[in-house]
Amino acid sequence: MKRIKNRIRIALALMVMLTGSAPAIAGKPMPVVQVWEGPFKSTQILKLADYAEGVVCYVYSPNSVSWRWGDSGDQRFDGNSAGAISCVKVGNATTTKRK
């Protein structure tokens, strides 16, 4: 569980680095349902899914992110050149018809 929480923190840190601002979290984070080794050393690809909403996200991230405490007590994440997030809408397997 600690490893999953660390991966979620890494994903959030990447979102901050890519967008410049932190997302508003209004509930539970999306669970990590699968993890693969990334194409480069010390990187990974995470699959996060919210099947109730029909959304799956793939996050490419480093295995660890360095950070420090800011002046106001918040966490400041250092920059990194590896990282991306891609979310897609998925259909419900029980209701999607295949031809």
Image (cartoon, rainbow, N blue to C red):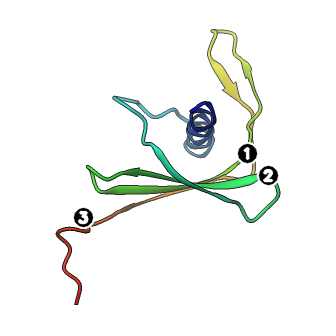
Q: Which residue has dot 2 on it?
A: 42
Q: Contact, CB < 8 Å: mark 2 with mark 1?
A: yes
Q: Kindly identify the amino acid type of the residue bearing the numbered disc 1.
A: Asn
Q: Earlier in the sequence, mark 2 or mark 1?
A: 2
Foreground pick, 25 / 45: 45
Please count the marks in the image: 3
Residue at horizontal 63%, vertical 41%? 17
Q: Quadrant of the C terminus?
A: bottom left
Residue at horizontal 64%, vertical 10%? 73
Residue at horizontal 23%, vertical 84%? 98
Query: Please, which residue is most extreme toward the top here?
Result: 72
The secondary element bearing badge 2 is classed as loop
The secondary element bearing badge 3 is classed as loop
Q: Kindly identify the amino acid type of the residue bearing the numbered disc 2.
A: Ser
Q: Kindly identify the amino acid type of the residue bearing the numbered disc 3.
A: Asn
Q: CA distance from mark 2 to mark 3?
A: 34 Å
